[in-house]
Amino acid sequence: MRKIIHLDMDCFYAAVEMREHPELAGQPLAVGGGSRRGVVTTCNYEARKFGVHSAMPGFQARQRCPNLIFLPPRFELYRAESQKVRAILRAYTPLVEPLSLDEAYLDVTASPRYAWDIAKEIRARIFAETRLTGSAGIAPNKMLAKIASDWRKPNGQFAITPEQIDAFVRELPVRKIWGVGPKSAERFAAEGVKTCADLQQLTLAELARRHGKWGHELYRLCRGEDDRPVEPDRVRKSLSNERTYSENLTTLDACQAALTELVEELFEELRTKAADRQVRKAVVKVKFADFTRTTKECVSATPDLATYQALLTEARLRKQQPIRLLGAGVRFTEEEDEPQDDPQQQLAFSL
Ligand SMILES: [Mg+2]
């Protein structure tokens, strides 16, 4: 039986800003909102009382909370704080898997100590060194640990012991299952499947018939079973987004429209999944109607839509052909203190 801790810093970016601006204590505060697309990246608990939450458009947040103070994000600063937190985590186990700037899994199975005590000590050390709070979930697997870290937020921790899994999971909304998004949760709800207990009524054969391979995973996850290991070496070298079009893109307008959509999604993913990484290059990938492909990239730490449009224009010059696939991505600078050779990650972005 594993001992997994999921550590999640409390409204991380907003908490760092509150620490840096003591004069704003007690006021509703949001990080983000300043860019063209303007969304709340993180907000503090004072702002949450007004119904403001992350990913909410800035104008809507202002409607709900007229006194909301917006601050532009300072990722350099958040990255530096995140490095301090990670250094503390690594003092307890080499098995640390960061999920984002403010979240990580730890596998402390090898420690003779209670995971509960380790989590408590880690949170105290983080606070002593950074004046920031985090919450922890403790469970025999990753899925349950991540759910548990939400239970006593902010500045708390919650454990699910092996004996408690059955009862805990039965009550759990299907949406909380790792990998179940809002759309599939809606579809399940339409069939009267709301909790994991409801989902457990479906046989493995039924789930597999409806969801294929994912059905097998669902069968296990809704019973609180998850054997994904904590993977410490997963350092992303790149992030990309691509799409094959059912009808080839033939005009410049169609290409630019498709590219705009891809790039916006890419930026959204960068913001949520890789805010702690430094972008080094922008990449555009094109597959033509005759299945030949080409890649164009340029060095840029802060690529914007215009960067991608220029790359696409260049790529299209290679061949006068309709386009069947477009991709937009970034390559990150590689951190020296992290392992760098991960052939699988390279394959995932083989351009
Ligand atoms: Mg967090």
Image (cartoon, grey):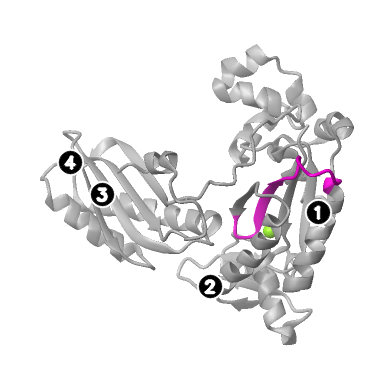
Say which residue label 3 marks. Answer: 254
Instruction: Tell me where residue 98 appears, x and y as whole percent.
Output: 61, 52
Question: How far apart are the two marked residues, 3 and 2, measured between alpha carbons?
Answer: 36 Å
Numbered label attached to residue 119: 1
Say which residue label 4 marks. Answer: 322
Q: Amino acid at mark 3?
A: Ala
Instruction: Mark 2 or mark 1: name the one nearer the start of the chain.
Output: 2
Residue 100 in which image quadrant:
bottom right
Residue 82 in which image quadrant:
bottom right
Q: Which residues are magenta?
A: 100-115
The reply to whether the C-beta atoms of the residues labelled 3 and 2 are less than 8 Å apart is no
Q: Is residue 142 left or right of residue 148?
A: left
Q: Is residue 342 positioned above or below 87 on the image?
A: above
> Farthest residue toward the bottom?
23
Question: How far apart are the two marked residues, 1 and 4, measured between alpha carbons?
Answer: 55 Å
Q: Nearer the viewer, mark 3 or mark 4?
A: 4
Question: What's the residue at 80%, 45% (across, down)?
Answer: 138
Q: Is residue 112 positioned above or below 189 on the image?
A: below
